[in-house]
Amino acid sequence: MALGTDFLLDAVVAEGLDHLFMVPGGLVDPFMPALARQPRLTPIVAAHEGGAAYMADGYARASGRFGAVLGIGGPGLANMATAAAAAKTDSSPLLLLSGEIPVAMEGLGEFQDASQFTLDDTALMRPVTRLSLTVASAKNLGHALRHGLAEALSQPRGPVHLSLARDVLEGDCDADYAPVLPAFAAAPLDRAAAERAVPLLAAAPRLAVLAGAGVADGAAAAALQAFAERFAIPVATTLRAKGVFPEDHKLSLGVFGYAGTRHATAALLSDEIDVLLVLGSGLNERDTMHWTLRQRSKALFVHVNTAQAELATVAGADHVVAGHASAFLERLSRLSEMEAAAFARSQADREAWIAGIMAGPRLYDTENCHRPGKPIHPASAIVALRAALPRDAIVLVDSGAHRAFAGHYWTAYGPGTYISATNLGPMGWAIPAAIGVQCARPDRRVAVITGDGCMQMHGMEVQTAARYGRPVIYLVLNNGALGNVWLRARQYGALPAELTSVVDHDWAGFARALGAHGITVTDPADLPKAMEEAVAAGTTVVIDVKADKDCPTPVYDFAAGAHAWSYHE
């Protein structure tokens, strides 16, 4: 027998979590003494409930488990809604716990009542979660939690919400908790469809792979690399999956789609490609070069994905395999002698094809990577940060023009080293999410590439990183504008340009005021020294780079695809 609060905290510890992200408040007061009774769980208090939920999202993406966030219902939960939506669109598993008033007081006008009599928190969260439940009694807390986590961890993963009445937190729960996560770590696969797909791949002389987020775990990425190396198969990734295949590998095509490389574009849209194996990607607008891949590619698609709704939407008449990319790659690691011989027969042809593509330039505008003069080009700052960090460092990239520059010029060497909220893409997400990543991976250096507009939204969470001694490096590309929005708006006249401009704040001074270390860089010649200082500091650091806003983003192939595209069913 345990209080509801103790049961919940013990349960998340049993699932392997060691951090809980939260904002205290009256509706969750019973958790305060309960946290003191659970020494294996470290609470991290955020500045804002949205920031706490973003931290939990970062923790989930970096740990491979789920992230947990706690706050009051009503205004606190409403502040988490955008974070839940971002997690849902990126299939990131979160457990959102919100406190509610006692059941007997619902509808009587009690302060912050957000029960079904008033705002109805569960209805608020239902569209942006996999499941949103009201738990009114400690007697059903055990199976409500298990049901919620089963939904969060089923494929495709996503956020779930439990609204917890005061009765639940202070009531006795006699359930025996058994962890859910091991049961949902399996990788499902339509075996019959997989068997039909293997001969299609083996018979293709010019075969390439497009790897998506479904290959993001270490085992799947290792299996992909082994398969590619065995038969000289080139690999491109989506922007969200950047790094699942080492970008300095001789078979790496880099990113295809938004901010992608010339090599990936040339290979996947080649008239010579026979088959494209798409692993764990839903093929959205940015991952398909504004759907150009589906329109122009001459390849037969073999599409492996856990989300059958996405398969039905994008797969067309080509071969689909419902299932997890890691399970399909495991099948490719067990080829028969006849199957392996079929793959090997076309290897020389494939190597010659790829050699021709690799002979051309990989990136656009590489002169900007070391451009002299003021203000600083964003590419120069990104390249300098990459040079200063170890190979296995984890970078989080926010939403804005800096996403395009980072996607193009940052080199990622391993799965889980490049993290971004790519589908919904809320501004400022990376600033708190990095704290969750650093909590999940204290053995890694963690950095953020963000902008001044993003800092205005969630920059206050720098104080959370500093307060808890998290050595996160924040690279702020401070260009005095809302990046991509300004690049578009300025074409419409002076007022649109003014509306999308930002005051040049002293973000280094802001960081120092919050207890972090602040560095200002105005000259590109000083970038290497600033990056080295940040890495050596061993504490939270904000690098305020006075950047040039008038810089075209390296999305030329994507822009051309968007310009040429017209809607049709």
Image: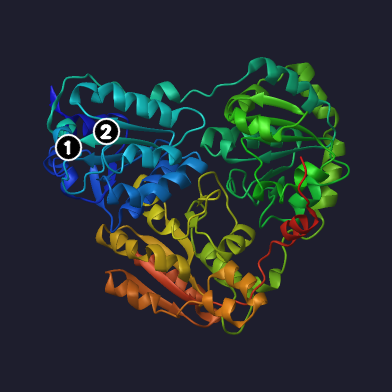
Q: Which amino acid does label 2 sit on?
A: Val
Above or below for 8 versus 24: above
Q: How is the image coloured?
A: rainbow
Query: As rendered, which of 23 and 117 lies closer to the eye?
Result: 117
Where does label 2 land, which residue? Answer: 13
Q: Position of 58 compared to 369: left or right?
A: left
Above or below for 376 versus 20: below
Q: Which amino acid does label 1 sit on?
A: Gln
Question: Do we see residue 541 in this rendering?
Answer: yes
| Quadrant where the C terminus is found in the figure | top right
Percent across and percent down for residue 90 are 51, 43
**Residue at screen point 11% across, 41% down:** 33
Above or below for 287 versus 405: above
Q: Residues within 10 Å of mark 1 (few under 14, many from 20)?
A: few
Q: Splitting the image into 4 quarters, where does residue 69 fall?
A: top left
Q: Position of 96 compared to 237: left or right?
A: left
Where does label 1 land, which residue? Answer: 38
Percent across and percent down for residue 441 are 38, 46
**Residue at screen point 58% across, 30% down:** 307
Tell me, for residue 535, which label it has, or none. none
Q: Element at badge 2?
A: helix
Q: Element at badge 1?
A: loop
**Residue at screen point 57% across, 60% down:** 403
Of all residues, the one furthest to the top in this rendering is 192
- Tags 1 and 2 in contact by the CB under 8 Å rule? yes
Query: As rendered, which of 88 and 74 lies closer to the eye?
Result: 74
Percent across and percent down for residue 197 are 74, 23
Above or below for 201 versus 272: above
Q: Position of 20 compared to 534: left or right?
A: left
| Quadrant where the N terminus is found in the figure | top left
Question: Do we see residue 376 in this rendering?
Answer: no
